[in-house]
Amino acid sequence: MVRFLTRKTGHPQRKALNHRIVAGLDIGTCFIRTVIAEVDSDDKVEIIGVSKVPSQGVRNGVIVNVEAAMNSIRESIEAAEQQAGVLVTYVFTDIGGSQVETMNSTGTAIVDTRGRNQPMEIGVDAKMRAIESAKAVLIPFDKIRLTVIPQEFYVDDTLYPDPIGIKGVRLDVKTHLVSASRTALENIRQCILRAEYNVDLDHTCLKTLAISRACAYDDEIDLGSIIIDLGGGTTDVMVLNKGAPVFTTSIPAGGNRVTNDIAQVMGVPFAVAEKLKLDYGTAWLFGGEDREEVIIPGIGNLPPEQSNREVLSEIIQARLEEILNMAREAVIKGSNLKHLNGSIILTGGGALMNGIVELTQNVWKTTAVRLGQASELGEVDLPYRSPEFATCVGIVLVNKKVNPNGTSGTRATSGVSEGAMGKLKKILKKFC
């Protein structure tokens, strides 16, 4: 499919000779975010465009209105294109929340395929056969296996980080299998295609896996860390240990629950509650600001009311504490890990809430909590290092070496293609 270009942009072109352009798209409950990066011949990434637009047609991370979501997707990508100075034809995206299921599985391969059971040097073939064996797990018809992530390799019951080159008779592997809803993936694909961009669902990335690529250090992954993505509709959690994911889950609650609580307790519309949360909200009072005045806009002919940040904070803290406790209980029950020496990494729009680090430290009983920020990848004045863009940056990093359909996936912003001219003529006919 060719992206039809129906407009000319007024911004300068970027010279991207021999460079690839990679666009990461994160379809969230509250916002749709896009990051566009330029990747050179050495696979060095430079972020050149970032955008965030309100999300329409998405509820709790699930697309419920294809037309509305399509328009938001197009608006987000076009805003990033305008900033980057390129036109994107191909995007990479992610999936998470209730649309994803994960499980751990094991696989085995006999190294000597001749059946002699003699120790032989393990090569790529044996490694791949073991992984394929781990994938032989029945999944529901309405699911598609998205990816398989190796966790540990054992050669004749001895643990090796990488078995290649080791001699042995039997190779065992532990893996983390990720499957996703067929319907959800198809709706994502339809939205992107209708927005006139290409997408290959084979490269769709697990949301928390993308975040780990962008924000988690190697030492943190080896020692054991937890990623908590605080979204609007869901809170996605991934436990990393010994260099790989060991447990993934999604809590069906996020920032919108907080806003709903504010709306109900203070008797204001959702939009007003959201503004109060963003303007005055805090998850942890540090002292001194508790009596700070908060003006609640009047509804209809009623005059504005006066409250304070302590009241607002109590509402916010109660709900966020509940969500974090739900995540903690799920991790303890699902991962079977007693102790982790890494960090708790907070990302998503909810990570921007004032005091969220302190509240998380209190709930999890640890000081090893930090906000997830990507490394510097280009222009420092772009907001891509914010925790809310962690997923988009991770999508770019995961797919930086992918060259879809043998093309760069982009086209310079000057000029109009023949396809664009044809489409433009059709549009003009409507007015003639």
Image (cartoon, grey):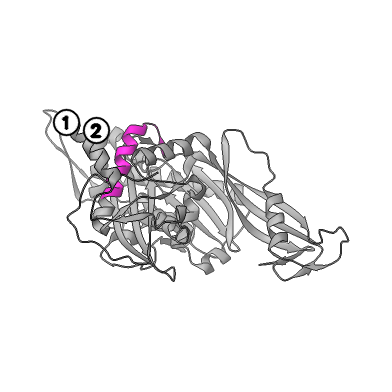
- The local crowd at label 2, few if under 14, some if 14 to 19, many if 20 or more residues have their Cα within 10 Å, is some
Residue at x-position 24% and y-position 43%? 421
Quarter of the image with the N terminus in it: top left
Residue 350 to residue 161: above or below: above
Q: Residue furthest right?
A: 116
Q: Amino acid at mark 1?
A: Ile
Give the extent of the magenta segment: 61-78
Q: Is residue 65 magenta?
A: yes
**Percent x, y for residue 95?**
46, 45
Residue 269: which numbered mark, if any? 2
Quickly name the residue at label 1: 299
Crowd band around label 1 with a 10 angstrom C-alpha radius: few (<14), some (14–19), many (20+): few
Residue 203 part of the magenta segment: no
Question: At x 25% / y 55%, what residue is drawn?
Answer: 413
Q: Which of these two is toward me, 21 or 249?
A: 21
| SS at badge 1 | loop
Question: What is the C-alpha distance between the residues marked 1 and 2?
Answer: 8 Å
Residue 223 found in image quarter: bottom right
